[in-house]
Amino acid sequence: MKKMKRIQAAALASVMALSLTACQGAGGKSETQGGSTAAATQKETEKPADQTTAAAGKTKISITFRNDGSDVLKKWFEHAYETYDKKDSIELDIAPITASEGDYFAKVALALQSADTAPDIVCEDTFQLPSDVAAGYLTNLSSYLKDYKEWNDGTFYGALVDGVTYDDGSVYGIPYCTDTRGLWYNKDVFAAAGLDTNWQPKTWQDVLDTCKIIKEKCPDVVPFWCNSGVATGEATSMQTYEMLLYGTGEQLLDNNKWIVKSDNILKSLNFISTIYKDGYGPSLSKVLNGEAGNIASREYLPKGKLAISLDGYWMTGNYKETGAAPWPEYKDKLGIAAMPTSEGQAPGSITMSGGWALSIPNLSDQKDAAMDFIKHCMSYDVYLDTIIAQGNIATRTDIAKDASYSSQPFMETCTGFLSGAFYRPRNSQYTTVTTHIQTMVESVVSGTSPEDAMAQYKSDVTNSVGAENVVEK
Amino acid sequence: MNKKQSGLLEEAKKSVLLMPSVLLLLVFFVAPILLTVYYSFTNLALSGENARQLKFIGLSNYFTMFKDRTVRISIGNTLVFLLGSLIGQQVLGFIIALNMRNKNRVFRGIVGPIFLAGWIMPEVVVALCCSTFFGDSGTLNQIFSFFHLPQVEFLFAIPMLTVILANIWHGTAFSMMNFQSALDGVPADIEEAARVDGAGPFQTMIRIILPCIKNTIATNTMLNTLSTLGVFGLIYMMTGGGPGTKTLTLPIFMYRQAFISQQLGYGTAISMILLVIGIVLSVFYTRIMRND
């Protein structure tokens, strides 16, 4: 009898241990599908299973994008639909995903794997595009582009067309925005600190010196803000780390191998470390938060609680009447300086550039209708409205010449940055490497030494991409 | 119909009646576990070339795991989190149960539910409550400032301790209830006999009460171990595994690898470590129980 009990107990124990792992797997999955993060991932995206035929026999096309709290993209698609001449035969299903950036890509990747959940149009960050193409998730648009006049007559910027062209030479998305980055600063704070309101640092040291003065003269103001956490995802990699690394003259890849150890990586991490060690950065609870970018641009900078923000041009979209944080005087109160190279070496300043594209999932069953709607979304009038509202840089050369677009504050400067812009590696491993960059930056910010953080990065990247794909310098 | 036949019929009946639950277990429980084990030997990915062609890559994920610094860090973190939670939950749960013993029903009726509140709350709510409690301008810091104590960024300065405290708050009631029913089962006459023989309260505790509830302690430890090993939501929502890797436990590391770095195969391989830790500890506890 006693033996029986023992066996039972042992069996029970192992069943419980097993169930633990089972729960793990399931838990992980549900987390991405509808789960919750600090940034409150909501479930508002599931679309009806039957997407082909809608109530009135209309063709239904669904469109998925990331809801970041502003509704400019939603308005774009709504406006496009209202002005669409095929409105009577097409029904539009707007299905945004409310999620942090990292979760958005995971949710999209999951949705694209099944015909039941794949939308007909999806917004893809151009860095995620090669990876999703390699996975076979996206439709090759080449045949759809043959009769797309604007595509073939050079209306779209060449560099951006390259950005959506995969290794096989085919196009997998229509770029709808691009961007440049720089140092935004609040002129009121600069004036209060006795600094020149026409600021252009020449080196990283200049930036740190300015931070020091601001900290001394305006102790209540956060001198410097850059995305620094895992929660802010790609923004941390691109707006912060890569802006620094590429400013040292080094890039992420050398001859198609990932650089995992170098003096320039250390130099970049040391800059970040100095910002936080010397108290120039915001409190960690603010910056290691999924909402960090929005807190800086919508709250701190306009209210004069922040002096300098390393961020992208789209930030100004917040300040327009239609934006999330209207700031009527932003044209005069805000300044933009180019991000200097580390020691001011040529070319003097640097910017990274990226952008987003509209793609058609491979499992969409309404590809023709979807492509037609994309063309309408990108047509001159519809697109002009949204690109101004988004506060982004247009991908069409003819829009760039439109007075209502080009007369926007800072537009000329930020478009000017484009000429020497760097783009992220068009490499399908980047999606994985970028997450390791984020961990590395967050480690430094929270007190790990740059050397240890780099060692961690080396281990992470080597494990992910294989020792044959990395190099030390 | 003879006796043997009716016995067979009875067996057959039982088997038929058991079929549905066995089937459900196989489909929703055994199959996913086996599939998970299989995936840990593949290059399954969420995106990229590997997503298109699922390949069996043998032990490659496991070799990577042994070289991975982060795996070692997260195993360490998981054990710290486990040990902290276990000790906190059990000691606190036991003390509360002991203090509530022999108190009148009104007292128990009022105090019990207060502790239970932490337990019946869904994990999301617990995480939210604790985040606001330990936050920069949260309740605890406001209490600190009232007494002119320095402000502490709990979630960043001492993140591991903070999530452990949150988990203790969440899980103590469960231990309390287990210990309560065990303590109620300790025969009063033995205790009285001990007292008559001159045993002090401390001696009664060590020699009478603890040996009587030994099995409950072991079971409770095992249940708590298994549920603590799997804690994901609480930590993910409070710190996201950060800052850096300071609260990166295995479940969070697994999630990050599988869904953020999009390496599903590697993520499942990491979950196997959890399975192994779970099995080892369970066997360990059952061994202890057997020794009585």
Image (cartoon, coloured by chain):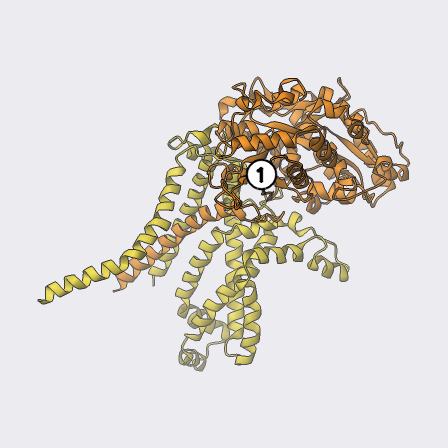
Chain colours: A orange, B yellow
Query: For the point 69% across and 37% down, which residue is it?
Result: A227
Picture coordinates of residue B2, whole percent (x, y): 8, 67
Question: Foreground: A121 or A99?
Answer: A121
Quadrant including the N terminus of chain A: bottom left
Badge 1 amino acid: Ile
Q: In which image quadrant can residue B272 be found? A: top left
Is residue B103 or residue A178 the one in the foreground? A178
**Foreground of the two, B246 or A194:** A194
Q: Which residue is farthest bottom?
A: B196
The answer to whether residue B251 is above or below residue A171 is below
The C terminus of chain A lies in which quarter of the figure?
A: top right
Give x and y (percent) for residue A27. 48, 49
Say whether residue A4 is left or right of residue B110. left
- Note whether residue A334 is visible: yes
Residue at figure coordinates x 73%, y 59% from the top left: B142
Residue on which the image places disc 1: A63
Residue A277 drawn above or below residue A8: above
Numbered disc 1: secondary structure: strand
Circle 1 chain = A
Q: Residue at x 82, y 29 (%)?
A: A407
Count of numbered tags: 1
